Image: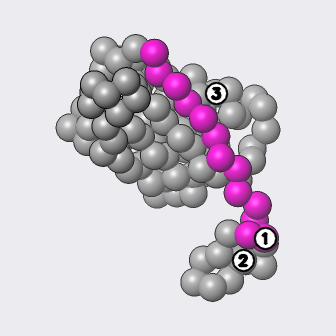
Amino acid sequence: MPHLLFRGISPQQLHPVAQQLAEQLASICQCGTDNFTMDCLHTTAVYGGAGEQSFPFAEVAWFERGDEVRGQVAAAITKQLANLGLTDIEVAFRTYREDSYYIDGVPCSAL
C-alpha cells in the first residue's frame, strides 16, 4: 500500500521509470519501496467509436496522508510520466479506510 494503477501506459513504457518512481514515492510517504504496487491495466477508449488507446491516467489507492503528501505524490507521478514523453496526465486518489482494508482476514486497524 499504496497501490498504483496505470491505464493508457504500457508496462514497457512504465518499466524504465518504475524503480525511480517507487523510490521517490517511498521518500515522500516515509515508507519502504516494497510498500508500493504498480500495475498497468490494458484499456481501450471506445467513446466516439475510435477504439484508441486511453489517455495517461494513474490511480493511487491508499490510506490518506494529507493534502501536502497527496500533492507531492501527484507531482512525482506526473513528472516521471512526462519524462516518458506523455502529456495530459491525470492522477486520481482513492482512499481506503483502515478498518475496511483487510490483510489475511484482519483489518489494518487491528494490526
Query: Is residue 42 located in the magenta-colored stretch of the structure?
Result: no
Q: Nearer the viewer, residue 58 or 44?
A: 44
Quarter of the image with the N terminus in it: bottom right
Query: Is residue 93 located in the magenta-colored stretch of the structure?
Result: yes
Query: How far is the residue under mark 3 from the one under mark 1?
Result: 26 Å
Q: Quadrant of residue 45?
A: top left
Q: Which mark is drawn over residue 107?
A: 2
Q: Amino acid at mark 1?
A: Asp
Q: Which mark is drawn over residue 99?
A: 1
Query: How far is the residue under mark 1 from the one under mark 2?
Result: 5 Å
Q: Which residues are magenta?
A: 88-100
Q: Is residue 111 above or below residue 40?
A: below
Q: Position of residue 87 (x, y in %)?
A: 40, 14
Q: Amino acid at mark 3?
A: Gln
Q: In this view of the protein, can residue 108 be seen by the observer? A: yes
Q: Position of residue 7 (x, y in %)?
A: 39, 38
Q: Are marks 1 and 2 in contact (CB under 8 Å)?
A: yes
For the point 60% across and 35% down, which residue is it? 92
Q: Amino acid at mark 2?
A: Pro
Front disc: 3 or 1 = 1
Residue pointed to by mark 3: 72
